[in-house]
Amino acid sequence: MRHPPQLRIPAVYMRGGTSKGVFFRLDDLPEAARAPGPARDALLMRVIGSPDPYGKHTDGMGGATSSTSKCVIVARSAKADHDVDYLYGQVSIDSAFVDWSGNCGNLSTAVGPFAIMRGLVDPARVPADGTAVVRVWQANIGKTILVHVPMAGGEVQETGDFELDGVTFPSAEIVVEFLDPADEGDADGGDAGMFPTGNLVDTLDVPGVGSLQATMINAGIPTVFVRAGDIGYTGAELQEAINGDAQALLRFEAIRAQAAVRMGLIADVADAAKRQHTPKVAFVAPPADYVASSGKRIAASEIDLLVRALSMGKLHHAMMGTAAVAIATAASVPGTLVSEAAGGGAREAVRFGHPSGTLRVGAEVAQADGQWVVRRAVMSRSARVLMEGAVRVPAETLPG
């Protein structure tokens, strides 16, 4: 039996922050995949190599972790005062599912360089030397991101001496600004407001876990924070302490599902399996000495608090960029569990310890009409091209 040749689709494989993914220009996708729907999802799953019952992504570009099972679609923006539209898909590893419910803060960093390199930004807005500010419309959540891309000799500067914990080698520093990053409402029916329940701290009744105090916030990405001590942890855990414990992962998923209902993101806990990307679940603790996954010693005096977060059902090896926005925002609001762990009081920036090291994030918050709002969050990341050319998928992946 004769089989058709594979499709050849222009693509770039990029690292952004502590994540990496496959980047596409919208116009380079096969016509059937240029609009949202089953054809697009099928294509991206095949690119990544999902669903993979072996959990390895051997037959695709994915890395079989939440940080490496990602796809990005970028197009010139039709929105005023923006350069590009950016759409992010989190591809499930072992099930046939692409989650479009949130953003990836780490890969947001790489959108700016990609857009410039692929000719999606007006050349008049890109200096030969200095900094190009790429105005990105994050289409998943309807927010603006400013990516400050260093330029040298008319090219994106990728190499440099900026070190990012969780990334092995130094690169050029890229400053990322998330403007008005709190959700104003969820497309799937979630409540409006940065604190969707109206409270800084709520009590979650979680079957099999018990009653827990929690801070639930919509900033950067919907996130639920609980105290590490309330669930039997110190906050200094590394991946193996959590990801090798099947019962612990079930408990975290139960917490996440209950929070998703309380935040208005889903109607029933049974729906959580179809919304794996959001909300995130994280646990916090006051600062303490610990040893990061690289062997680097982190002193309590270097950080304001400890944070560990799960993504797609596993403890993240560092910290998701969007969760970092949530951490900085919640730390800036006195009365949240995150602020409590950081020592309380008002602040404009926070440095937290995560499994790979530390990260500093700034947040500008204020009260308006009795409600907390966040104007912007800022962090430094890095990005670079790992490979460019074309990705290939079997032609039968797409209909017709």
Image (spheres, rainbow, N blue to C red):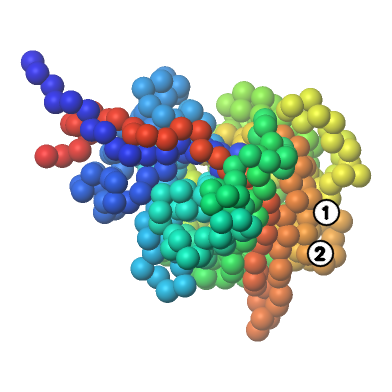
Residue toward you, 248 or 101: 101
Mark 2 and mark 1 in contact (Cβ < 8 Å)? yes
Camera-side residue: 20 or 66?
20
Q: Looking at the image, is mark 1 or mark 2 nearer the viewer?
A: 2
Q: Position of residue 116 (x, y in %)?
A: 47, 53
User: SS for tag 2?
Assistant: loop
Of the two numbered discs 1 and 2 on the same chain, state the one appearing first in sequence. 1
Residue at the spot 56% in from the left edge and 60% down from the top edge = 127
What amino acid is found at the position of numbered circle 1 in the picture? Ala
Q: CA distance from mark 1 to mark 2?
A: 10 Å
Viewed as shown, does residue 185 lie left or right of 400? right
In the shown orientation, is residue 152 left or right of residue 398? right
Quadrant showing the C terminus: top left
Q: Residue at x 48, y 28 (%)?
A: 64
Q: Position of residue 224 (x, y in %)?
A: 62, 52
Residue occupying image coordinates x 21% and y 48%: 31
Task: Tell me if I can see residue 266 in this picture.
Answer: no
> Could you tell whether 76 is left or right of 248 in the image?
left
Q: Which residue is mark 1?
A: 342
Would you identify the image quadrant in which residue 370 lies?
bottom right
Within 10 angstroms of label 1, few (less than 14), some, or many (20 or more) residues?
many
